[in-house]
Amino acid sequence: MINDKLMRNITYITMQKMMVSRLSFIIYHLSFLFLLSACTPTPENIQKSDLLPPLYPDYCDVTIPENIAPLNFLLRADGCDAIEVDVRGTDVVRTDQRTITINARGNEAVFDIGEWKALLEQAAEWEMPLVVTVTARINGQWIQYKPFQWKVARDKIDPYLTYRLIEPDYEIWNHVQIQQRCVENFEVNALGHHEQLENRCMNCHTYANQDPQLSMMYVRGPGGGAILNQGGQLSKLNIPGSVYFCFSPSGRYITYSTQKIIPAFHSDPSKRLEVYDSSSNVFVADMQEHRIISSPLLSDSLKFETFPTFSPDGKYIYYCEADSVILPEDIRQLQYRLVRIAFDEHTGQIGNRIDTIFSERSVCHPRVSPDGKMILYTVADYGTFPIWHPEADLQMMNLQTGAIDRLSIVNSRKSDTYHSWSSNSRWFVFASKRDDGLYGKPYFCYVDKDGKAHKPFCLPQEHPTFYDNNLKSFNAPELGKGKVPFDVDDVAKAMKMEAESFK
């Protein structure tokens, strides 16, 4: 009996302590939230401005896909120590509209990802633009900037992006990384890393039809080769000299170029570097029979051929061709034109006639939209390495009408190039140096059903200061429909395999 009574008392005391502890926990957190709200200033005596807010990245009046990660940003305004951001729909009739309001110290706007996704889903479903109002306390005065809009497209973008991270200055080919980023959130995984690949240079990772189950990347140097991914099974292929490549629609063939790449420094201090090919040719590799298919039209000793890509129906190989000149003396006379040649996927035969598509400026990196309607390419004054040409711009041609869109809403005064399409042909990504002329960053552009391009926006990051602190340049971005079934460790193991030869 004594023991029972003692146990009841102990239980009672224990329960009382737990209740007190839990109450203390609740009081502590309520106090913390109260203090937090008390410490976060709210706008008062607001002065309105007719200027758009100085956001970084520039997310004012852009079209975004329903499935994009939050557009976290900085307000670049001297003296800013507090910020309020209000995001809401434009439908004044509906009473069940979602809204997001951020009140924070400092100049950073960071959205809750759950609230963000719910807001964008509703906006896309209702086809309703979102109005964004930014109010900031600057040197003690609350300023409300001119509101702007985010148009949310129901056309989703492919959820994964692969790219190279590379030193931006001059030509440092070691310390290269290849990463894959989920653009719906902030998840990043490594596909290639210089520390595990003996500081080798790696070409970009390229999908077949944006399919993560079939892709390839090329590791240069002795013992290197093309790393082929087939459903997560990696193999190493000996395809000598492969630099730029593209899968055929069936995945059986790849078309690729071989180059002898020469870097040269400019005497003009306004230009850092020129990179050119001393020779280049285009071939096709049959991945099923392990044979190389060539044509004298694609390996003319008096011409340079490069940047090959298949049309989505597999009937053509588009590429860039230039008449040879004396290099580097006549580099400014090196002009590449956009051409195409027929190809038969059933027989693996290359055609016997070259058709010129565009020849007004020097062209590189053509990419046909998956629906076959548009071809996107880069133009520059001369040469074939546009990331060092500030005048390099994107152009888009309608393959059905021949009409050319010079994409004035897309291009900047710095290099804009290295682009790829989303699988639905509604989005493309490209690398732009528009901020400082040195660091490339991925930008996304929406192309609506009428073929009109919209103002592009930069890949959002979890921390708004990311691009200020990042010391790598994003290069050769590629969109994919899913996460690839391998990682950097798998690539390192594949590099130790015996390479499969082609004849």
Image (tube, grey):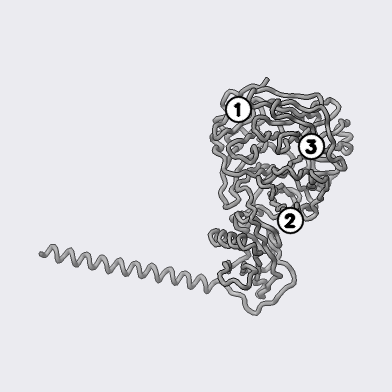
- Which residue in the structure is indicated by mark 2? 454
Q: Which residue is drawn at 82% across and 36% down?
A: 339
What is the crowding at mark 1: few (fewer than 14 residues within 10 Å), some, or many (at least 20)?
many
Kind of residue at disc 2: His
**Mark 1 or mark 3: whose residue is earlier in sequence:** 1
- Which residue in the structure is indicated by mark 1? 236
**Mark 3 or mark 2: whose residue is earlier in sequence:** 3
Left or right: residue 498 compared with residue 321: left
- Residue furthest to the top in view is 503
Check if mark 2's residue and mark 1's residue have beta carbons within 8 Å: no
C-alpha gap between disc 3 and disc 2: 31 Å
Q: Which residue is drawn at 60% across and 50% down?
A: 183
Q: Which of 117 and 238 is in front in this view?
A: 117
Q: Which mark is residue 275?
A: 3
Check if mark 1's residue and mark 3's residue have beta carbons within 8 Å: no
Q: Which residue is drawn at 66% across and 36% down?
A: 174
Q: What element carries label 2?
A: loop
Kind of residue at disc 1: Lys
Which of the two marks, 2 or 1, is nearer to us in this view? 2
